[in-house]
Amino acid sequence: MTPSSPTDATRSAASPAARLRRTLRWIGLGAVTGVLAGLSSAGFLVTLEKVTELRVAHPWLLWLLPVGGFAVGLAYQRLAGRASGGNALILDEIHQPSAWIPRRMAPLVYLGTEITHLFGGSAGREGTALQMSGSLTDAVSRRLHLDQEDRRTMLVAALGGGFGAVFGVPLAGIAFGIEVQSVRHLRTRALLPSVVAALVGDRVVRLLGVHHTATPQLERIDWSLPLVAKVALAGVAFGLTAHAFVLATHGVKGALAARVGWSPLRPAVGGVAVILLTGAVGTHDYLGLSIPLIESSLAGGAGVVGAAFALKLLFTAVTLGSGFQGGEVTPLFVIGATLGVTLGRALGVPVELLAAVGFVGVFAGAANVPVACTVMGAELFGVHGVPLFAVACAASWAVSHPHGIYGARPEGDGTMAA
């Protein structure tokens, strides 16, 4: 039976000592969640940087991408079970709890993502960080025999802690964990542990000496109605692009499922497709995280071709849709920043400004988290751009795919009858 959420009357009726104990308890549990998120994210970021450097130094590794894809596909077929649900499984357990998240999720997604990046798949890192944080946190909840409501609260905090730790944006992490799930009462119940988890997770990563990609701060912006209108128009383009990304990824997944019966072969086929695409475009720019494309876009767009956003979208949809492991978010940052360059040139808006807005705008639409993305924009690029981030993220969210990259989420309080 699912316990009901505590009401305001119940909370107010508790004695001050009981409220203090409850507060201290959630601070402690949030800190544990943050440490798990920070340690797992830090270790992952360090090894991801190493495998990326190895791939860049040895371009021939791309030829092994189909082999790596087959290995990932076979491992997931034989070992993953429910863990193959990834972030969608974590959200499912928040919305409608049914069973503990398999502990094998963390090592499987970690190794799968490292293989993806070692051999040149176009993927990100957020999905891996969230799955590691969520599965490790759920293992602690299981060990502590937490009840269902406490367990769900911990999972929300784990999402915020993992997101904030892997990108170095703790405030956006808090907003992300609260916003990405749809259980109304958890948005208040999980606030305190989410704040603690995100702040602790980010601090752990920084104390371990792990550095995030540096982003330039926007200078003071000369406001005008035409500028806001152009940013709103760009926001619509960001949302439609996010919609296209979701459709493309699902389309690749569905097409391969219909044509390739044995699931381990699907990422192998995807690996062959990525090799062919790389040969067709004549560059390795769209492999891996594609951080140089972000840096070039935010520095004025030199060398960024007009179709860069579409190419990164295609490479990533093929990689993730075929069954490779890794996140969607960093590729969405790349897609947004490069689309911002293209739109900035067309609309007469400073390219570096619209690249920063696109960086958060496409993700806002793809994940349905406009508030978290507005906060992220402030953390990464400074407060001067906050109104523009808000306009673009809201417009992107309004026109994007209703299910987003994390799938359909039920509305309501998430409780179940006995």
Image: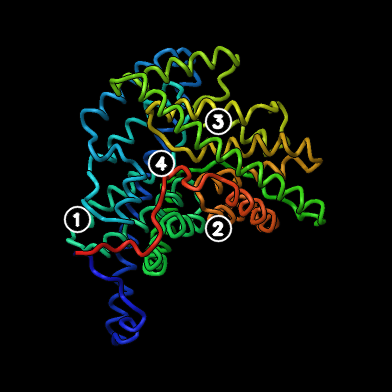
Residue at numbered disc 2: 371
Helix, strand or loop for disc 1: helix
> How far apart, in angstroms, are the residues tagged by discs 3 and 1?
38 Å
Label total for image: 4
Helix, strand or loop for disc 3: helix
> How far apart, in angstroms, are the residues tagged by discs 1 and 4?
22 Å
Residue at numbered disc 4: 127
Residue 27: horizontal and vertical position, in percent? Answer: 34, 68
> How far apart, in angstroms, are the residues tagged by discs 2 and 1?
31 Å
Q: How is the image coloured?
A: rainbow
Q: Residues within 10 Å of mark 1 (few under 14, many from 20)?
A: some
Residue at numbered disc 3: 313
Residue at x 53%, y 55% (from the top left corner): 372
Mark 2 / mark 1, whichever is N-terminal: 1
The label shown at residue 358 is: none
Three-letter code, disc 4:
Gly
Three-letter code, disc 3:
Leu
Q: Is residue 201 above or below residue 30?
A: above
Q: Residues within 10 Å of mark 3 (few under 14, many from 20)?
A: many
> How far apart, in angstroms, are the residues tagged by discs 3 and 2?
23 Å
Helix, strand or loop for disc 2: helix
Helix, strand or loop for disc 4: helix
Q: Quadrant of the C terminus?
A: bottom left
Three-letter code, disc 2:
Val
Mark 1 / mark 4, whichever is N-terminal: 4
